[in-house]
Amino acid sequence: MKKSQLTEYVKSRPFQYLLVGAIVIGLLFWWGYNAAKRKFKSSSAGVPYPDGGSTLPAGGRAVLDELVSQTFDVLDGFDFSQSKELIFQRYAALTNDQVTYVYKAWNARYEQTEGKTLTKRIDEETFPTTAMDTVTNRLRSLNLF
């Protein structure tokens, strides 16, 4: 393609429409991506630990991370066994810092896909158990909504 043909092509209306359309689509994508990123930013990122993190186990966060995964598993489907009750009973033995850690870890992993914080997700459970109500009340007492 010669320079004069290229100049004519760039000056043509179809090319200009195509260029403007591509710019508009690019801007809309960029705006939507940034809006979604702001909306789904974990709401628990700046939540402080009630006891300053002093009661978090030094190397035992794997146990808490396992509890996060198990909590998601029982909330993410039908569970007619006693496992739901047993998992939520484990929260009673946790310190306030540990409960806060579980809340923050659950939100960091699942809030974006679920669209809800841990407290809201437990609240909306179709068949809540007594232990679930206890956990929800404890989360609320720690201002973890």
Image (cartoon, rainbow, N blue to C red):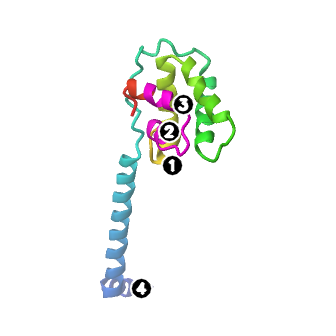
Which of pointers 1 and 2 lies earlier in the amino acid sequence?
A: 1
**Image location (x, y in percent) of residue 140:** 40, 28
Observer-side mark, 3 or 2, equals 3
Q: Is residue 66 above or below residue 73?
A: above
**Figure quadrant of the N terminus:** bottom left
Between the residue at mark 1 and the residue at mark 2, the CA separation in whole angstroms equals 15 Å
Seen at 55% across and 24% down, the residue is 91
Between the residue at mark 3 and the residue at mark 4, the CA separation in whole angstroms equals 78 Å
Q: Which residue is mark 4?
A: 2
Q: Which residues are magenta?
A: 118-138
Of the residues shown, which amino acid type is indicated by label 4?
A: Lys
Q: Is residue 105 above or below residue 9?
A: above
Residue 130 inside the magenta-drawn segment = yes
Which of pointers 2 and 4 lies earlier in the amino acid sequence?
A: 4
Of the residues shown, which amino acid type is indicated by label 2?
A: Ile
Q: Which residue is mark 3?
A: 130
**Crowd band around label 3 with a 10 angstrom C-alpha radius: few (<14), some (14–19), many (20+):** few
In the foreground, 34 or 125: 125
Q: Is residue 59 above or below residue 115?
A: above
Of the residues shown, which amino acid type is indicated by label 1?
A: Thr
Residue 122, label in figure: 2
Observer-side mark, 3 or 1, equals 3
Which of pointers 3 and 1 lies earlier in the amino acid sequence?
A: 1
Residue 25, label in figure: none
Between the residue at mark 2 and the residue at mark 4, the CA separation in whole angstroms equals 67 Å
